[in-house]
Image (cartoon, grey):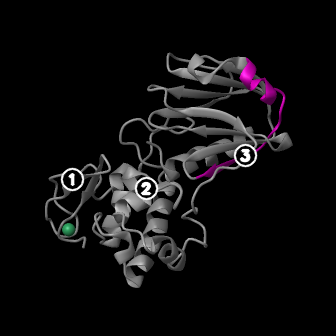
Amino acid sequence: MPELPEVETVVRQLRPKISGQRIKKVIIIDRKLGSASRYSTITNKKIRTVARRGKYIIIRLNDDVRLIIHLRMTGQLLWQGNSAQADKYTRVILRLSPRAYLLLNDLRRFATFTITKTPLNLGIEPLTAAFNSKHLGNILAGSKRAIKDFLLDQKKIAGIGNIYASEILFAGRIHPRRISSSLKPAEMLKLTAETKRILKLAIKHQGTTISDFADTNKKKGNFQRLIKVYDKEGQPCPCCRTEIRKIKQQGRSTYFCPHCQH
Ligand SMILES: [Zn+2]
């Protein structure tokens, strides 16, 4: 699933290409998204800018209308300059003016495409200055949940998913099953610093492609080469050579080094 770095990659590519353009036509191919008339309100609206919040892509239109896209498992937002090259996975086509097309492709059809005026109710953005060890201490206080589950809670911290949660905890040397409120100040300091470092590094490498992620030009990310533990069960830890273990937390896989993480 695309997480903060993958969504940020998409947003940074789209922003200069579509800001200032007008949505001339919304072509809904997948009826699961509702009828075209539902989207008639955005026709002829101008795109003011493109932003990211957590794992959401927010296309801001005039009159304070937002087109909010969540790529979920396999969604891809593709930009095409001359003509729309739809395929069997294309679910929506936006025809823009001056001539360009924005396509939402999605193999598994979980991606969402909604029009709203309501801002998203999400937790803190981890790349902002406000996300520091003091803030982390405040939101972790009293929490009996495992720290891995806490990191995935979008209402607490927005944008971290399964891949980066494992990587951040490995870098922070914190065991994924640690009770959130048991983290010491030095660990919170390390955790916030590693969260920022890893997410920024992943953005620099255009995100991670384990299975489906592609950017707006259908290119894969490059951060998978730098991954230390995610999806590496049985392989040696890059620090101590102990075998990396896989456990399930809330039904999702977590990867960690039992020697390095406490
Ligand atoms: Zn290790």
Residue 244 drawn above or below residue 41: below
Q: CA distance from mark 3 to mark 2?
A: 23 Å
Q: Quadrant of the C terminus?
A: bottom left
Label 2: how many Cα within 10 Å (few below 14, some 14–19, many 20+): some
Residue 178 place in picture, x, y as percent: 30, 69
Asked if residue 34 shows in the view, the reply is: yes
Q: What residue did someone put label 1 on?
A: 246
Q: Is residue 80 magenta?
A: no
Which type of secondary structure does the marked residue at label 3 adopt?
loop
Q: Is residue 48 magenta?
A: yes
> Is 41 or 49 nearer to us in this picture?
41
Which amino acid lies under the numbered mark 1 shown in the image of this protein? Lys
Q: Which mark is residue 118?
A: 3
Task: Please state the extent of the stretch shown in magenta in the rendering.
Answer: 37-53
Q: What residue did someone put label 2 on?
A: 152
> Is 249 or 215 nearer to us in this picture?
249
Q: Quadrant of the N terminus?
A: top left
Question: In the figure, is residue 196 to the left or right of 166?
Answer: right
Q: CA distance from mark 1 to mark 2?
A: 17 Å
Residue in the image at 58% along x and 43% along y = 10
Residue 57 place in picture, x, y as percent: 62, 44
Q: CB atoms at circles 1 and 3 under 8 Å apart?
A: no
